[in-house]
Image: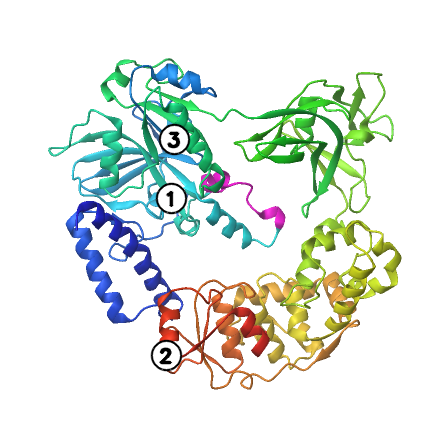
Amino acid sequence: MNQEEKIARIKELTPLLSVAARVYEQEDREIMSNFEYDKLYDELKALEEETGIVLSESPTHKVGYEVLSELPKEKHESPMLSLNKTKSREELADWLGSQKGVLSWKMDGLTVVVTYRNGELFKAVTRGNGEVGEVITNNVRVFKNIPQSIPFKGELVIRGEAIIRYSDFEKINEAIADADAKYKNPRNLCSGSVRQLDNSITAQRSVYLYAFALISQTGDDAPAFDYRSEQLDYLESLGFNVVERKKVSASDISDSVSYFADKITSNDFPSDGLVLLYDDIAYGNSLGRTAKFPRDGIAFKWADETAVTTLREIEWSASRTGLINPVAIFDPVELEGTTVSRASLHNISIMKDLMLGIGDSISVYKANMIIPQLAENLTRSAEYSICDAANEDTIKIADTDKALLITDKRNGCSISKQTVSSLCPVCSCPTCIHLENDVMTLYCVNPDCDAKKIKLFAHLVSRDALNIEGLSESTVEKLINAGLLHKQSDIFRLEEKKERFIELEGLGEKSFNNLIDSINKARNTVLSRVIYGLGIANIGLANARLICKYAGDDPEAAIALTSDELTAIEGIGDVLAASYTEYFLNNSNLDNFRTLLSELSLEKEAAAGDALSGKVFVITGSVEHFANRNELKAYIESQGGKVTGSVTNKTSFLINNDITSNSSKNKTAKQLGIEIITEDDFISRFGS
């Protein structure tokens, strides 16, 4: 096995054994036998000793968690300058001239300088402002792919980009119920994750580092390099993930740019362009630098395809926090192969800077070939200004007697109602403008705005709660916006509002009839589904079942439970108990619960120990209807079943949503004749 093959095997074994160790220690289950684990552990340890490479997740090299009071600052030995930029392929070719170059991704994350001494990770510092960065050594130690040890024993300094992949970003956001609490993009999430004071949080965020430069290397066995491509190959041999790159010349650079451009939509990492460096290190260094840019490299930004269109309206989208976001609606145009007719404006200050008025000619593009944005306003018809609140047509700014005045430059009249909504699009209550750090944002002043209820309604009707088919989140939003839903119990009174329902876009009489049938079916339910459907913080379905069982499925007994009584229930801790009791101490919540119950017919839940008694389950893979595998395990055990970590001839069922997977558990189950079922199969057979 050569060095490259050894490194590949280390990268295969490290995450496998890390997961196996974690689930064994923290979840009391096994994904492989002790014999298999020990065998692979010994193989990994031997490979680490042979190569000198130890990755961050390696079970042979535990990284402890630490909480800091603040991140120390450190001045960089030399300024980290930004690269000059171009959007022209011809300019790239001219810049390269007769030289060879290295073309690579310009990843969109956070640049980090990492130092190794005596073969061990010694220090990591963020780019910061280019002069001074923050020391984040403890956080970098828990990056998913960072080598803790490398075979070079001198001092090595590299630069890399810390990123969070799109797939991990989506998983993190999916776990956040509140739409307004979700992260905006992978770069912002990565920046916050890398700079945490508690590195256990960083460890949960799946941060990766991709090396893109060897800055310095000192020591007796330090190799000398003439070319940057050699340096990057060398970093790969030390165990680093290195940014994808191509060696180019002026004659073929345009084709290489096309190669990268074709991969943008399928990439699992954020990128905002490319970087071109002279391959010849001595030549690049001889060029020196300007006050702003080094001369040995240049950044290529994608030449945004733009189109001119007409602004037709500003749509206002309310959120659960009360923030109302402006969205530009314009005549459809083709951009980057898709039809675009809307783009977020983010806040009123952007509208002010663009001097946006209805009917303006605007230029639109896709940022990084993905996100629709307004480039410029060609006619700039509206002037925005802060003035005294002299009339009711203006919109008051919170806590002041000032207002936002919008004037049409074409005829001098006020067009404020055309552009900025004076009423919330959801509850029709007055809006106000917050002015903070010179940024103006629009808010709904109504603390009971229905926009804040959309997620709660959607949760109540979800499969594991009341299971009302036909009430998707988008349909719930339509009904709330139309004033058909105010309280959760209003769902069960929709039959009285048929005429208004069938007039809504995308809905009709057939949708109405199907929905009413589903609502009437949902009237017969069990108390635990109702408790879960309320959306009480931290209370999952399994927890709700445990609580209702303790209360004898009596609603009044359930809401009267004290913290001491709740913590006496196995599986309910202090945090859950506090969430539960605080919810029912709120009179509004209590009234909502009792009104909802008046629309329902509660059935007795099957006694624990009956449904799954004598059955042994193994759970593998991700789950969809339960919060996590532990919640599914808790439910099985609450019904008298047993959950183990390994498939044996005593296993009754293997639960795996990917039945066709070639995983070891699936293979073993098939060999032993154990039935493999999906989560849906489980719910269909045994309830949930």
Residue 606 got which mark? none
Q: Considering only vertical position in the picture, is 506 above or below 495?
A: above
Report if residue 368 is visible in the image.
yes
Determine which residue is flagged by label 1.
Answer: 208
Residue 127 got which mark? 3
Crowdedness near tag 1: few (<14), some (14–19) or many (≥20) residues, C-alpha within 10 Å: many
Q: Choose the circle earlier in sequence order: 2 or 1.
A: 1
Task: Judge from the rendering whether residue 402 lies leftward or rightward of residue 375; answer left or right.
Answer: right
- Main secondary-structure element of the magenta-colored stretch: helix
Q: Considering only vertical position in the picture, is 673 above or below 331?
A: below
> Observer-nearest residue: 183 or 575?
183
Report if residue 342 is visible in the image.
no
Q: Gap in Å between the C-alphas at discs 3 and 1?
A: 16 Å
Residue 414 horizontal/vertical position (percent): 84, 23
Q: Are marks 3 and 1 in contact (CB under 8 Å)?
A: no
Instruction: Give the colouring mode of the picture.
Output: rainbow
Residue at (70% x, 24% y) in the render: 352
Residue at (28% x, 58% y) in the render: 59
Residue at (29% x, 13% y) in the render: 287
Residue 539 horizontal/vertical position (percent): 59, 65
Task: Judge from the rendering whether residue 143 lies leftward or rightward of residue 353; answer left or right.
Answer: left
Q: Which amino acid type is shown beneath numbered disc 3? A: Arg
Q: Nearer the viewer, mark 3 or mark 1?
A: 1
Crowdedness near tag 3: few (<14), some (14–19) or many (≥20) residues, C-alpha within 10 Å: many
Q: Which residues are magenta?
A: 179-192
Determine which residue is flagged by label 2.
Answer: 672
